[in-house]
Amino acid sequence: ADNLTSSSSSLDELLLSISHVAPETCRKFFRVSSLSPEQVLEILLGFEWGVKDLLYDATIVGSLWKIFKRAADRIEGFKHLPQSCEVMASMLMRARTLREVESLLAKMETQGVLLASNEIFSSLIEEYMNAGECERAIFIYDRMRGKGLVPTLSCYSALIDVLTKKHKANYVLHIYEDLVEMGLGFGDVDAMNFEIMIAFLCRNGKIKEARKLLEKIVATGWQPNEAVLREVADVYCEKKDFDDLLGF
């Protein structure tokens, strides 16, 4: 098994493998057979507070992840403290072990542990976008929205920016419509991306979708600039669809 998914090593072996990073924290728990939720948190905080730069190291984070999982495996009914879950998720995110973050979120949900999920989900989406895994990012986005959670504005901006550049028109439409439905201020995201999106829709024969989206956003109080209006008008003129142009 790989470094992040296996938790079969003994606690002493796991602590020894990272004791050079936080010797005092590790020394305290040598020869402890089973950890309590409070002790797991103490270990995680011992590493988080003292060695933040090293927590980008997947090897160190991997050992902490094994300790985290092993503690729950050893005792029936064991539940990690919410703070432990948040710290562990943050460490996994820094090490960019995204599937493990997903696994942690899913496990905590089954146990009814509530995390600061907006930030965690948003960071997860941004990391998947940065890694070029657009479909996975959208899957996490839809899962997040299904739980009634609202992504951060930086998450929205990252989604719109990358998906627009990759010409993922249907995905971007989906996200813009969510923005409107949630009543978020359109000025809070990059308006330039919207102009690019409208132009892309118009030039690819999706004039109805472009107009519908534009009307929804104008209804929120946002005023489109001349470039956006010209894109729509030009397509109507090219199609000689003057009735719709006058209606627009």
Image (cartoon, rainbow, N blue to C red):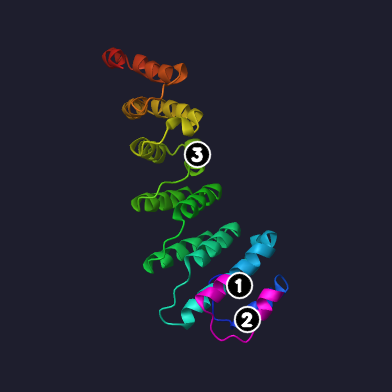
Along the line of sight, the residue nearer the viewer: 161 or 191: 191
Packing grade of label 1 (10 A; few <14, some 14-19, many >=20) is: many
N-terminal label among 2 and 3: 2
Q: Measuring 50% from the left and 75% from the top, which residue is drawn there?
A: 37
Mark 1, secondary structure of its residue:
helix
Q: CA distance from mark 1 to mark 2?
A: 9 Å
Q: Residues in magenta?
A: 24-43
Q: Amino acid at mark 3?
A: Ser
Q: Label 1 belongs to which residue?
A: 43
Q: Amino acid at mark 1?
A: Ile
Along the line of sight, the residue nearer the viewer: 103 or 112: 112
Q: Are marks 1 and 2 in contact (CB under 8 Å)?
A: yes
Q: Label 2 belongs to which residue?
A: 29
Asked if 230 appears above or below 113 in the picture, the reply is above
Asked if 172 appears above or below 230 in the picture, the reply is below
Is residue 170 shown left or right of residue 129? Answer: left
Q: Amino acid at mark 2?
A: Phe
Is residue 142 shown left or right of residue 6? Answer: left
Q: Are marks 3 and 1 in contact (CB under 8 Å)?
A: no
Residue 157 tag number: 3
N-terminal label among 1 and 2: 2
Q: CA distance from mark 3 to mark 1?
A: 36 Å
Instruction: Tell which tag, 3 or 1, sits nearer the viewer.
Output: 1
